[in-house]
Image (tube, grey):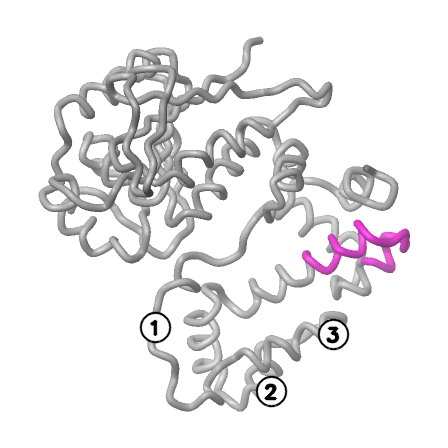
Amino acid sequence: MGRHRVVVLALDGVQPFEMAIAARVFGSAQDLAGRPIYEVLTCSVDGGTVRTDADFTIAVDHDAALIRRAETLVVPAPAGVGPLFDSGTLEDEVRDAIALRPRRARVVSICIGAFVVAAAGLLDGRRATTHWQRAADFQRLFPQVQLDPKVLFVDDGDVLTSAGVVAGLDVCLHLVRRDHGSEVANRVARLCILPAWREGGQAQYIERPLPADSSASTAETRAWALTQLKQPLSLGELARHARMSERTFTRRFREEVGTSPARWMLRQRIDRARQLLESTTLPIERVADEAGFGTSASMRQHLRAEVGTSPTSYRQTFGPGSG
């Protein structure tokens, strides 16, 4: 079987980092024999050099005809100005280029690349996301799209959209996991120095005025909870430590972290278990106890749900002596 072909469409004013994300993530994926899984190619509309939003241009080797052979088409963030962001309209040559993709090819947008995909009509009636800072503009221009500005990315089957820059890494890594499983995706994450999975959503990055009373933050309680992972902390105990009602604590926690206290605690326990599996030879039962899962069965269930593998397999891949 040949390598899966990923085509990156670099548009005028492209943001260089976003343009390189697909090559970095998909280009790092290998099968168990060390063979590349994906082929990543870059094109422009006419095959000519592409102006970036930085102080340099980029030369590419292909024009839009390459899109006819794409299995995944990636649309990085273009410059955030012009008719696309004023009226939601695409230049004819860009629309025609995107229309060249095969019917079965999936489309991935990175950051405000979602504006391009929406203007091409590929998001009508579908869920999507984009950078929170441009969410209001997006909703105004594309009211037919079900925008969720709080998440890092949306997987709607054959069309995927991501939020800001780093969320582009998240969505590409997600596709590697979807295509080839967690073991391959985790190796890519390690090679690229990325978290294999990030908790929360854009809510934790949206600019908000800080509370006038610094004691209203849940940060101190979160720091305390990390020292108490072995204990079965309840929402009531967390709220009492923060000197808040459970309702207020839950609301403040979600505003600051982007997820619920229970979900956050679970994620910290999983991270602690992974750390111990990677760095120690402690028995699995001891790791489960130290991470606050109580039993190895509980840890196994949660680790498989979140990471896609068992504690034993995880240790074999990432533990002492695995490299």
Residue with the most extreme top position: 1
Label 1, on which residue?
208
Closer to viewer: mark 1 or mark 2: 1
Which residues make up the magenta segment? 271-287
The spot of residue 101 in percent (x, y) is 30, 17
- Mark 1 and mark 3 lie on one chain; the one further toward the N terminus is 1
Quarter in which the C terminus is drawn: top right
Asked whether 316 or 21 is in front, the reply is: 21
Q: Does the magenta segment cover residue 282?
A: yes
The first of marks 2 and 3 along the sequence is 3
Q: Is residue 92 left or right of residue 291?
A: left
Q: Amino acid at mark 3?
A: Gln
**Which residue shows up at 72% across the image and 75% down it?**
227
In the rendered image, which residue does mark 3 sit on?
231
Quarter of the image that includes the N terminus:
top right
Q: Position of residue 236 (x, y in %)?
A: 58, 82
- As helix, strand or loop, the secondary structure at mark 3 comes to loop
User: Which secondary structure is most common in the magenta stretch?
Assistant: helix
Q: Is residue 191 left or right of residue 25?
A: right
Is residue 49 a member of the stretch shown in magenta? no
Relative height, residue 279 to residue 233 (above, below)? above
Identify the mark nearer the N-term, 1 or 2: 1
Residue drawn at (57%, 77%) of the image: 235
Pointer 1: residues within 10 angstroms few (<14), some, or many (20+)?
Answer: few
Amino acid carrying label 1: it is Arg
Instruction: Answer above or below: position of 288 versus 94.
Output: below
Real-space Cα separation, disc 1 to disc 3, in angstroms: 33 Å
Q: CA distance from mark 1 to mark 2?
A: 24 Å
Q: Secondary structure at mark 1?
A: loop
